[in-house]
Image (cartoon, rainbow, N blue to C red):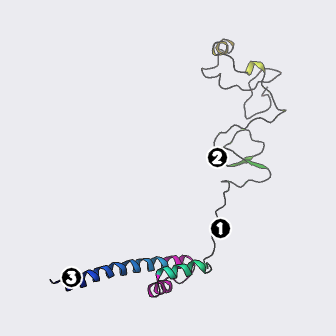
Amino acid sequence: MDFLSFLVWEWMFIWMGWLVIWLVVSVVIGVLASKRGRNGFGWFLLAFVISPLLAGIILALIENLAPQQSQPETRFLSPVSADTKACPRCAEAIKKAATICRFCGYVFPEPSGSITPTPSALPATSTESREAHPNQGIGSEALSLPRCEDCGATLSPLRKTCPN
């Protein structure tokens, strides 16, 4: 192989590399044009014939014809209406009067002016609690339920009135 044929082959490989790059960038311009609501194949041909760089600049300057997709709204899983409220833990809609979420068990704080716990229902030290309430199990210190002011019965978080 002489030096002249070597230069021809070298020149051919260089131009083939540039042709592949030109073709790939032209395909990218065609894909971008189709995402902007234009004819992708037409823009591919235009980019291949004139220049991918020039076609890309023109494509960036012209109007986007693709319909704009609105952002998805963040909604609660259940619709919230005037007589419901949203649970802060699971975002489900529950009745405004509910004190516990029926989906996740979240206990809503009591509004002011409602039943207040009596001193006997307040948590005491572990030994005082077991001595004062021997029928309650271990761990009852963490759960302080309100008591009825008249008879001392423990009130359920679901009920605001005394069962007796």
Label 3 SS: helix
Helix, strand or loop: magenta stretch = helix
Mark 2 or mark 1, which has the lower sequence index?
1
Tell me how far mark 3 sits from mark 2, CA to CA: 73 Å
Tell me how far mark 1 sits from mark 3, CA to CA: 59 Å
- What is the span of residues highlighted in magenta in the rendered image? 31-51
Residue 137: image location, x then y, percent = 61, 20
Q: Which amino acid does label 2 sit on?
A: Cys
Mark 3 or mark 2, which has the lower sequence index?
3
User: Residue placed at 52% from the left, 79% from the top?
Assistant: 56
User: Residue placed at 26% from the left, 80% from the top?
Assistant: 10
Label 1 SS: loop
When the figure is inspected, residue 145 is found, relative to residue 4, above or below; the finding is above
Mark 1 or mark 3, which has the lower sequence index?
3
Determine which residue is flagged by label 3. 6
Tell me how far mark 2 sits from mark 1, CA to CA: 25 Å
Decide which of 28, 109 is in the foreground and name it.
Answer: 28
Query: Which image quadrant is residue 15 in?
Result: bottom left
Q: In this view, does 104 lie to the left or right of 112?
A: left
